[in-house]
Image: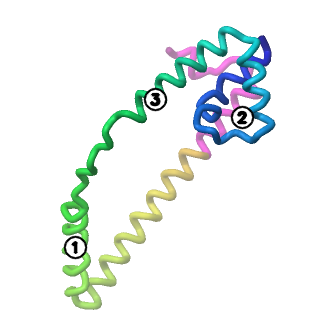
Amino acid sequence: MSQCKHIGPLLPEYQDGTLTETARREVAEHLAHCAACAAENRDVERSVALLNHLPMPEPRLDLWAEFEPKLAMVEEENRLQPLARLRLWWHRAMAHVAEGAVIYTHLMAQRTLSSMERYLIRDPFRLME
């Protein structure tokens, strides 16, 4: 039974033929003796065969629709005067600093909360609920 836990996740790789020779031999030996795993292997085999017979869909991604507005924004930015461009860059930099401060504050709050839970018997905030 303990071997079955280790064999189950290997079945897709066994079907694909990507296992090492030693692992492939071990899986084959286990499948010969374990009816439950052999049945699961047949299910995996049927699923792989079904998926291999499905037609490949054509990609429908229109990259230009996503790329064109970004390109227009860059071109517009390049037309700005140097001082206006510098001001734009400054505002972006400050926005990134603010995002970093929010993330840092969140991480410190999480760290403090985990430290409190480790040293307190009861969480005083959960008593309020």
Q: Is the magenta stretch mostly helix, strand or loop?
A: helix
Measuring from the top left, give residue 113's x and y in whole percent: 64, 34
Q: Give the range drawn in magenta.
A: 108-129
Q: In this view, does 95 lie above or below 113?
A: below
- Determine the residue positioned at 60% across, 20% down: 41
* Magenta residue check for 84: no
The tag on residue 73 is: 1
* Magenta residue check for 117: yes
Closest to the camera, between mark 1 and mark 3, is: 3
CA distance for labels 1 and 2: 46 Å
What amino acid is labelled 1 in the image?
A: Met
Q: How crowded is mark 2: few (under 14 residues within 10 Å), some or many (20 or more)?
A: few
Label 3 element class: helix
- Determine the residue positioned at 23% across, 74% down: 71
- Determine the residue positioned at 63% across, 27% down: 11
Nearer to the camera, 21 or 83: 21
Measuring from the top left, give residue 22's x and y in whole percent: 80, 36
Q: Earlier in the sequence, mark 2 or mark 3?
A: 3
The tag on residue 115 is: 2
- Determine the residue positioned at 74% across, 41% down: 20
Whether residues under marks 1 and 3 lie with C-beta atoms below 8 angstroms apart, the answer is no
What amino acid is labelled 2 in the image?
A: Ser
Q: Earlier in the sequence, mark 1 or mark 2?
A: 1
Label 2 element class: helix
Q: Is residue 5 above or below residue 105?
A: above
Measuring from the top left, give residue 1's x and y in whole percent: 77, 11
Direction from residue 100 to residue 29 in the image, left or right: right
Residue indicated by mark 3: 49
What amino acid is labelled 3 in the image?
A: Ala
Q: Residues within 10 Å of mark 1 (few under 14, many from 20)?
A: few
CA distance for labels 1 and 3: 48 Å
